[in-house]
Amino acid sequence: MVMRITGLSSGMDIDKMVSDLMKVEKVPQDKLRQKKELLSFQTILYREINTKMAALRDALNNVRYSSNVTGFKAAASSNEVSVVANSATSASSHTIQVNELATNSKLTGSAGVTNFGLVGTAYSSQTIDTTNNKIVLTVDNSAKVITLTPKAGGYTVDEMKDELQKQIDSTFGKNMVTVGVNGGALELSPVAKSGFTPQVIVSGTNTSVLGFTNGQSYRFSVGQTIGDLATSNKLTGSGSLATSGQFQITGSGGTATIDYVPTDSIQTIMNKVNASAAEVTMTYDSVNDQFVMKSKKTGVATGISVQDVTGNLMSTFKMETATAAVGKDASYILDNGSVQTSATNSISTGDGTTITFNNTTTSPITITVASDPSAVIDKIKKFVTAYNDMIDLVNTRLSEQKEKGYQPLSDEQKDAMNDEDIANWNKKVQQGLLSNSPILKKIKSSLREVFSDTVSGLDPAFSTLSSVGITTVPYVTGVPQNAGKLQIDEDKLRDAILQNPDAVNKLFTNNPGYESQQGVAVKLYNRVDSLLGNLIDQAGRTGGKDDDITTVIGSQINKLNLKITDFTALLNKKEDNYYRRFTAMEQAIEKGNAQMAWLSQQLG
């Protein structure tokens, strides 16, 4: 950095002069900053519309599926069953008696998979200090640090037993883990609670001080690898456990072959089973110390079988001697007819009602399907409200006129203003920034087009929104934000639903694959989703970075940031150059003053 000399010799305020010169030099950079801030304001405004569009899409999602716009509501006289009028077209009633629920097939391995115990190798006394006095003890998934009291020369095995017990009781509480001595080695035994013995794991770099190995546990853990289990003797018969192999599972989805290698943990192997085509889930029951396999589907056709192909993992897990319980079909009587069965606990009636069995019943339950236009009207009203909120904001942004004389504030200007004044100024700057936005114009025209369209292939009396009482608000001069908003004639909509609920349903939800035949909600949802993508491409998602280079505006802001950074370096050089010149001037004046003083002295 250049040595900066103030104007002692010249009498000039050098700092102020350089500052004033730099203000002129900074003008191009200030313009870059203004461009950047204008783009940031555009990002804010676009993302505000993005939020409104997302809310509209959510509201449309509730009216684009036929099951949500049936115009009917199903109710049951008991919560032993649940009912939904998925596609009901008329009022009806049913009775249902559930004799038996559909169940999953289950394969329960024999209990006693684990060789319980946590005994270290022979204890050897050694000095305990602050470098080796901490171990991690996990009791029933709660891991805590146990700190031993330092002691030169170390503890005897009995002294260490007492010290370790003291610190465990202090950390976890009494009657959680008992410390004992077994053949000259320390032993940890968890205390059973309500018939369940929790897991205990010793870990950390200092476990060898106590004679334990890092990760040694009381019971088998699903996080252990096949290789570890083969040497740790934690599984019954694991002394002969093959560390690699494969086994087959047959379930309702077919037969799947599962391979395993020494580095696979038991959890990894269970994940492979759960993701396989056999459609079976495998879990470890830590309470009963056994493995369980369960079919993902219900019914009699979901039996499970398992066998080792190579290796002996399933036999070691005691799954080849497992108890099999074949799934059952549900048994029920509908409308006092004959006994029927179902592989699932859900059935559909001929009139579009779905009944789900929650429990068996002792007597028939009554199910009533009745007209419910209010539920449909409420969903449509929410969609209309969301649309009006969105189009109000779009209209406002498009109709705003830019205020002359308002540009983004510089840092110096902001320092001279309070927060409220800055906020009010920024509102003026933002005004009119989106008045010519092609994206907003497309949003307005693309969505309004749907409201005037006729849905092809439907009953002509119910093929447009206006036919069911949904129309656009009449335009009022001077109120541009209301242009294109929707209004509902609730009485007409209710009458349409009561008269022909299926036709009203199709008006919103019809989706045969051709856009001309798509229901209003389906077509609107697709367009809103596409337009949201355009907004995100332009300005990014709400909460995203302003300079996200994957967006149009973000890329522009990023380029401006680079230019501003480069310009800052250039300004620093120019400022140093000005100071260098003024320093030279000061030195010249100082030299001239010295010469004048010398001449004065010589001339007496």
Image (cartoon, rainbow, N blue to C red):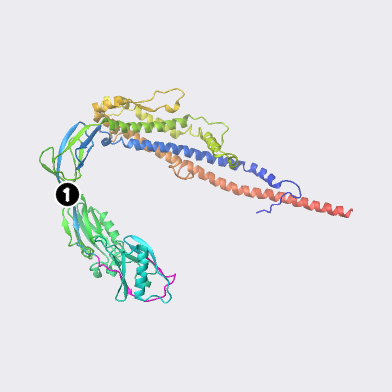
Is 12 placed left or right of 318 in the picture? right
Using the rendered view, name the quadrant where residue 282 is placed. Answer: bottom left
What secondary structure predominates along the stretch shown in magenta?
A: loop
Q: Is residue 300 above or below residue 533?
A: below
Q: How many marks?
A: 1
Residue 247 figure quarter = bottom left
Residue drawn at x 19%, y 55% as measured from the top left? 106
Residue name at image x 23 percent, y 68 percent: 237
Residue at position x 10%, y 39% from top? 337
Q: Position of residue 283 (x, y in %)?
A: 25, 57
- Mark 1 closeness class: few <14, some 14–19, many ≥20 residues within 10 Å: many
Quick check: can you spot residue 517?
Answer: no
In the rendered image, residue 229 lying in the magenta stretch gets the answer no
Magenta stretch? 114-136
Q: Residue flagged by tag 1: what amino acid is it?
A: Gly
Q: Position of residue 365 (x, y in %)?
A: 16, 39
* The N terminus, quarter of image: bottom right
Residue 61 or residue 437, whichever sits in front: 61
User: From the viewer's perspective, is residue 278 above or below residue 560?
Assistant: below
Q: Residue furthest left?
A: 338
Q: Position of residue 327 (x, y in %)?
A: 16, 51
Q: Position of residue 496 (x, y in %)?
A: 27, 26
- Left or right for 231, reference 583: left
Element carrying mark 1: loop
| Residue nearest the viewer, comparing 473 with 363 | 363
The residue identified by callout 1 is 299
132 within the magenta span:
yes
Is residue 103 something that shows in the picture?
yes
